[in-house]
């Protein structure tokens, strides 16, 4: 734990942008709570939750080149696992969150065996179909509440810490922030190691990578494992914050899978923290439109989804490399700012 904290401190010391973001994110929940502003705090929580999922997605798509639009699978598995452990087995979400990540990882590895036989758009279509299969299965599965879903009961005051039940989103922002910090450290290690270079080689040309001795299937599975794990943690956060899950919410193609993809694309999928930036720009806009505009004009239900499309269209036309890539091109952010200077020693594994 101490080494992880020291590594994060060392990383933010070398990176003024991460340092600035960290300070702002640490202060914002306190300000929102002091001013009694639950709506901005909830937007911050959602931005953190989607940032976790988008960065995990980016490892598989941006670094490995496997475009997934089915990450709702791992999000939903994480959400349901935490709820089932808490509701049926009285296991604290502090433990359930970690188990949820591993459950999502297991599902991801199981799916990776058949899905990684596919390439290009066929892989993408298979991820969409898989997500829909999971949604339909959970809709008719009585153990998980079927289409009605599962809801956690209100607990006694002395059990609030055990079950992480607090009024408002303020405490949950800090939990999400802690998970995001851990994810930043883990993914930073991966992308700046031999694994990260192999993943990028696979993205550019997996046939050439295989010829050079990279075990393509192995490293795709590694990317899938980490991507599914952290997306599962994001789903677990959803459960402890909202205390209700159903297949329509946590396995949804648009509000989960597509939102994750759009956050990643807006920020810049070929960069380390691009998806994080994208989530913090994209989610507040869509939430504001959904709550402040759509809620007041019911006839325009779904307008926030149109906003998603408009934002994606504008970014793709004006900033095809994403916001981070644009800032990098303009020289505002140094090229490869978050990558280590030293080269990775050793060649590909010949397995």
Image (tube, grey):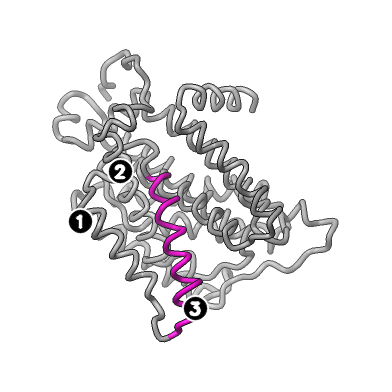
Tag nearer the camera, 1 or 3: 3
Distance (Cα) linking label 2 and label 1: 20 Å
User: Mark 2 near mark 1, Cβ–Cβ under 8 Å?
Assistant: no
Give percent across and percent down for residue 183: 50, 38
> Does the rendering let one see residue 106?
no
Q: Identify the residue at the far right of this view.
A: 158
Residues packed near mark 1 inside 10 Å, few (<14), some (14 to 19) or many (20 plus):
few
Q: Does the magenta stretch include residue 66?
A: no
> Does the rendering let one see residue 53?
yes
Task: Tell me the magenta residue range.
Answer: 275-298
SS category of the residue bearing label 3: loop
Q: Which residue is identified by label 1?
A: 122
SS category of the residue bearing label 1: helix
> Any mark on residue 295, and which?
3
Determine whether, in the image, residue 199 is placed left or right of residue 301: left
Distance (Cα) linking label 1 and label 3: 38 Å
SS category of the residue bearing label 2: loop
Q: Which residue is identified by label 2?
A: 269
Residue depicted at 42% across the width and 67% down the height: 252
Determine whether, in the image, residue 33 is placed left or right of residue 11: right
């Amino acid at each position: 734990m101490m080494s992880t904290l020291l590594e994060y401190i060392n990383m933010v010391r070398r990176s003024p942008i991460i340092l600035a973001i960290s300070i702002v994110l640490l202060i914002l929940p306190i300000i929102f709570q002091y001013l009694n502003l639950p709506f901005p705090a909830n937007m911050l929580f959602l931005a953190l939750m989607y940032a976790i999922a988008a960065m995990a997605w980016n490892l598989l798509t941006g670094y490995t080149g496997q475009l997934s639009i089915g990450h709702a699978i791992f999000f939903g598995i994480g959400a349901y696992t935490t709820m089932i452990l808490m509701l049926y087995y009285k296991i604290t979400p502090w433990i359930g969150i970690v188990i949820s990540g591993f459950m999502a990882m297991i599902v991801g590895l199981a799916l990776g065996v058949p899905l990684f036989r596919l390439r290009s758009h066929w892989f993408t279509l298979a991820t969409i179909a898989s997500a829909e299969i999971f949604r339909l299965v959970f809709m008719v599965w009585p153990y998980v509440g079927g289409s009605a879903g599962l809801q956690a009961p209100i607990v006694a005051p002395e059990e609030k810490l055990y079950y992480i039940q607090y009024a408002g989103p303020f405490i949950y922002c800090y939990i999400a922030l802690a998970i995001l910090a851990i994810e930043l450290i883990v993914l930073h290690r991966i992308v700046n190691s031999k694994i990260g270079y192999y993943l990028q080689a696979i993205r550019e040309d997996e046939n050439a990578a295989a010829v050079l001795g990279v075990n393509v299937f192995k490293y795709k599975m590694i990317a899938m494992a980490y991507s599914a794990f952290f997306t599962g943690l994001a789903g677990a956060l959803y459960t402890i914050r909202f205390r209700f899950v159903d297949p329509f919410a946590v396995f949804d193609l648009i509000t989960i899978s597509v939102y994750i993809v759009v956050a990643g694309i807006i920020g810049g999928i070929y960069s380390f923290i691009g998806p994080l930036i994208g989530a913090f720009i994209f989610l507040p806009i869509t939430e504001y439109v959904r709550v402040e505009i759509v809620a007041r004009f019911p006839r325009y239900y779904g307008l926030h989804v149109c906003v998603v499309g408009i934002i994606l269209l504008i970014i793709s036309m004006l900033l095809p490399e994403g916001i981070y890539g644009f800032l990098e091109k303009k020289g505002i952010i140094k090229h490869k700012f978050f990558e280590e200077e030293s080269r990775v020693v050793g060649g590909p594994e010949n397995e």
